[in-house]
Image (cartoon, rainbow, N blue to C red):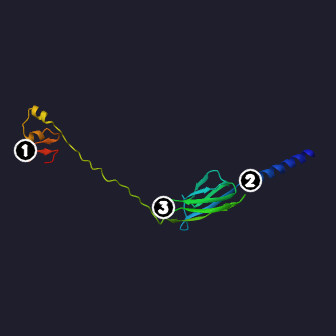
């Protein structure tokens, strides 16, 4: 008879412990819509000082989401979708309860466009040659100004009518 009482007492304690463990967390659920229409793919981020890190989920085809195993406390629930204005709601989640946070997102009314451009770099090539008079006297060239100018890089006399051309320009 004592063994039956012991087994019965053990089962009651096990049942009580299981019930107590199951009641240490809570859940958060809800529906996210756009203009009243349930929408799939909305990112739902749940954060709280009571929670290590954040929890993120995405709404299903019916716009529903569920975040389970949350410790009780105050939570910020953020709803985001590209092209829509993000929405944040505050929710209190109680012990062993299912809290609800629904959201209806609106189109973004402001758009920021930043255009950055730089002006093209204008490069000017400076060609300069300094030739000493002593070198000119020693070189076997004509003793004219044109003959001396033709010694500079990029200078030729193949322009129209034999004109002097500097880097392709007359």
Q: Earlier in the sequence, mark 2 or mark 1?
A: 2
Classed neighbour count for the residue bearing mark 3: other residues with Cα under 10 Å, few (<14), some (14–19), many (≥20): few
Marked residue nearer the N-terminal end (3 or 1):
3
| Left or right of 130, for residue 70 | right
Residue holding disc 1 = 162
Is residue 146 shown left or right of residue 121? Answer: left
Q: Residues within 10 Å of mark 2 (few under 14, many from 20)?
A: few
Q: Nearer the viewer, mark 3 or mark 1?
A: 1
Q: Residues within 10 Å of mark 1 (few under 14, many from 20)?
A: few
Indicate the position of residue 108 as horizontal and vertical percent values: 49, 64
- Distance (Cα) linking label 3 and label 1: 67 Å
In this view, the mark in front (2 or 1): 1
- Residue under the point 86% across and 46% down: 7
Callouts 3 and 1 close, C-beta under 8 Å: no
Local secondary structure at mark 3: loop
Q: Which mark is residue 83?
A: 3
Q: CA distance from mark 2 to mark 3?
A: 40 Å
Residue nearer the viewer, 15 or 167: 167
View extreme (bottom): residue:
36
Q: Nearer the viewer, mark 2 or mark 3?
A: 3
Instruction: Please count the marks in the image.
Output: 3
Q: Secondary structure at mark 2?
A: helix
The residue at 44%/61% (across/down) is: 112
- Give the quadrant of residue 60: bottom right
Q: Which residue is mark 2?
A: 22
The x and y percentages for residue 92 are 67, 61
């Amino acid at each position: 008879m004592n063994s039956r009482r012991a087994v019965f007492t053990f089962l009651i304690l096990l049942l009580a412990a299981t019930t107590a463990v199951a009641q240490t967390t809570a859940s958060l659920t809800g529906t996210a819509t756009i203009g009243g229409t349930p929408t799939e793919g909305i990112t739902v981020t749940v954060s709280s000082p009571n929670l290590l890190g954040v929890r993120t989920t995405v709404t299903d085809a019916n716009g529903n989401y569920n975040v389970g195993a949350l410790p009780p406390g105050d939570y910020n629930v953020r709803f985001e979708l590209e092209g829509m204005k993000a929405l944040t709601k505050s929710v209190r989640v109680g012990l062993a309860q299912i809290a609800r946070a629904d959201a209806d997102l609106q189109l973004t009314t402001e758009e920021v466009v930043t255009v950055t451009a730089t002006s093209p770099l204008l490069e000017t090539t400076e060609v300069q040659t300094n030739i000493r008079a002593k070198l000119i006297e020693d070189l076997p060239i004509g003793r004219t100004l044109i003959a001396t100018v033709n010694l500079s890089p990029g200078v030729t006399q193949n322009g129209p009518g034999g004109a002097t051309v500097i880097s392709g320009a007359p």
